[in-house]
Amino acid sequence: MRLAVLVLLALIVFLQLRASGFGRHLSDDREVEVVVVPSLPGQVGIPAAVTAKGPKTKGYLNGFRPVNESRVAIITFTTEQKSYLHMSLRNHQRYANKHGYDFIVDFDQHAERGLMWHKFEMVERLIDGGQHDWIWWMDFDTLITNMTMKLTDVIADAIKETPDPDAIDWIFTPDCWELNAGSFITRASPRAKPFINATIAYHEANATYEQQLSEQDCIRDVIRGGVFANHVKFVSQATINAFPKEIKCWDQEKRPWRKGMFAIHFAGAWAHLEGEDDATGLLMRQYIDDVVGDDDP
């Protein structure tokens, strides 16, 4: 039943994209070809790469300009007053300013499925806006801890070892579990939207009162289904989602955050600092002075 839902949704969304003209023209009217990945028996192929046809120009489809020239957005949201509100906002904004990225914050959410589903609404909004090539989602309980590092370099390193770098739309990390969705990177292309729709459809088909499913649970299970295997890349947790030594939920490399790493995530701090009413704020104040390269006045 779950596989059938994923297959049907992938087919519907793919047909919608083709009907809408996605993948047919660049901004300068160059024709392009949508290449469909062959599927396993019983699965549906989905767009895997877009290849230009005709004379070379400077036009690019959103999400497919050279990575080092990509327009980047860092996004998050918060709906509560927190002790670390200013620290988190300032940290992300200063990093974005340093590298010419956009930093976008929502302070309200209206996702019917629950608070954390709003991240998908933000991602879709930016894809539809057509102003970016890559999107970095970060939970609000994070800090960027090495401001000398460019996100575009991290993306390039993540996709360069894959058989087809242009096929990768999603970059995730594990933690001590199979997936942690508190920090991930998305190609800002309409081709990334079938994955979102499949995740929502999976939740609708499988979540019950007795079996609550978070957006992270659903992302994990959609990836397990294999339909999007060629479009998802996992990198080590330390790459964009390191946990501090106080939060002992690391991936197989078992590397807690150390100074010089790109980002730190205080995921579930409340569960690891028992008796501390403001565990995330306490840890963020502890680690903020270890940020590398924050040399703005």
Image (cartoon, helix red, strand yellow):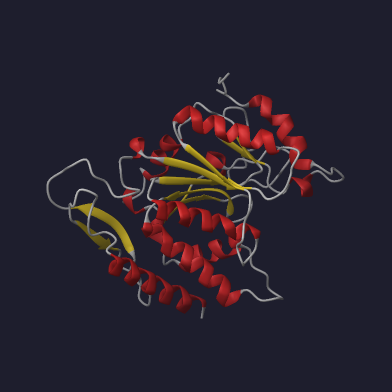
Q: Residue at the spot x=60%, y=63% of the render?
A: 111
In the foreground, 257 or 193: 193
Q: Is residue 16 left or right of residue 216?
A: left
Q: Residue at the spot x=48%, y=38% of the render?
A: 102
Q: List x then y, in percent, for residue 253.
A: 58, 43
Can residue 275 be seen in the rendering of this structure?
yes
Image quadrant in which you'd find residue 296: top right
Q: Is residue 290 above or below residue 142?
A: above
Can residue 138 be seen in the rendering of this structure?
no
Image quadrant in which you'd find residue 258: top right
Q: List x then y, in percent, for residue 286.
A: 73, 30
Q: Residue at the spot x=29%, y=61% of the render?
A: 22
Q: List x then y, in percent, for residue 126.
A: 45, 51
Image quadrant in which you'd find residue 141: top right
Q: Is residue 53 above or below residue 238?
A: below
Q: Is residue 229 left or right of residue 255?
A: left
Q: Is residue 21 left or right of residue 184?
A: left
